[in-house]
Image: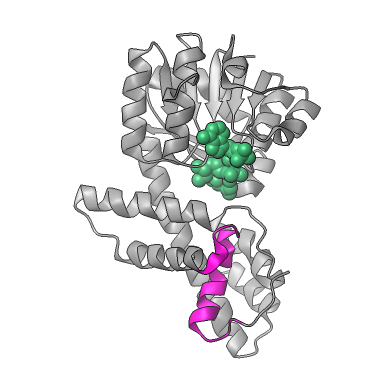
Amino acid sequence: MSRIAFIGLGIMGSPMAVHLATAGHAVTGYARTTVKAVPLVAAGGHATTSIADAVRGAEVICVMVPDSPDVHEVLAGAKGVFDTAEPGALIIDFSTIRPDVTLELAAQAAERGFRLLDAPVSGGEAGALAAELSIMVGGAAADFEQARPIFDALAKTVVHVGPSGSGQTVKAANQLIVAANIEALAEAVVFLEAYGVDLEAALRVLGGGLAGSKVLEQKRGNMLSRSFEPGFRIDLHHKDMGIVTAAARKAGVVVPLGALVAQLVAAAKANGDGGLDHSALLRGVERLSGRADKEIS
Ligand code: NAP
């Protein structure tokens, strides 16, 4: 069992920290909004009000914050992890960020005597709550092996995909696939409704065939009830579509469908839907189809 600091107790970080505490690790959490540490404390963990307090004595430091500048601030900022943690600690960044930022931070970590794994996750809030995430890990094989018990407490599928930054590259591909899937599902829903088809019945039968997917399984409820409480915020998917389109451009490959979906995600954000779950891409298709008069629950 390890002494673990957990920084960022949001939609994903909170249930993940809870699972680690429940598995018997000594978990100290840091959340800027202190109420977010309540579930961790209820599960036997501790809460602190600074990164320095959270990482004191920690062998493993987990980070789960929204974007590249946030991870940069948490790790390399003043009184951040590099300034305050015990050298030798293993840092696991579960956040989804730019692969090039991971490489830069991994180099800085090594200079300061730390080890960094990039370990972005997939599976959504449901996967985090059920400890059934899929975790794609980049970094040194020995560090991956050390982190295995932590990953196993959170995930059903854990794969070491290569050196530092590889986890983020795989996650960028994941986000391209997920966004395209949700957009296709949203278009199918608007199409089916236009024909007055029983939507629940249609999605049930589609789920049993080749059109079935984890996206259909997890998001059909949101679309049927028009409830778009996140889940995964459109703001975050907008960030991720920026990551994948920029990384593809840098690699000299094209992602035409990804670029189109990135624009539709950007349109959702521009129309004020950034705080809604990404299943609210449905609202964008409705706007484009002249059917934007529906209430959300
Ligand atoms: P979230 O609910 O917004 O939680 C992020 C947490 O990080 C918040 O508690 C926030 O604190 C904290 N935070 C933000 N900036 C910080 C900073 N600079 N310093 C310290 N703490 C900071 O986001 P989330 O949905 O858990 O997503 C976290 C990461 O997981 C993102 O990279 C996302 O892309 C990825 N992800 C999310 C999902 C999903 O379904 N939600 C699925 C897979 C991957 P405050 O509450 O005080 O603002």
Q: Relative to 125, say whether 156 is above or below.
A: above
Q: Relative to 145, say whether 277 is above or below.
A: below
* Residue 67 spot, x, y in % from top left: 46, 41
- What is the quadrant of residue 223 in the picture? bottom right
Q: Which residues are magenta?
A: 271-292
State left or right for residue 93 relative to residue 109: right
Front residue (pair 102, 21): 102
Residue 91 visible: yes
> Which quadrant: the C terminus?
bottom right
State left or right for residue 184 relative to residue 13: left
| Residue ID at (22%, 48%) | 250
Q: Relative to 267, say whether 125 is above or below.
A: above
Say if the magenta span includes residue 278: yes
Quadrant where ligand 1 appears? top right
* Residue 286 spot, x, y in % from top left: 55, 79
Front residue (pair 57, 162): 57
- What is the quadrant of residue 49 in the picture? top right
Residue 119 visible: no
> Chief secondary structure of the magenta span?
helix
State left or right for residue 36 relative to residue 135: right
Residue at the extreme right: 42
* Residue 29 spot, x, y in % from top left: 65, 25
> Which quadrant: the N terminus?
top right
Say if the magenta span includes residue 105: no
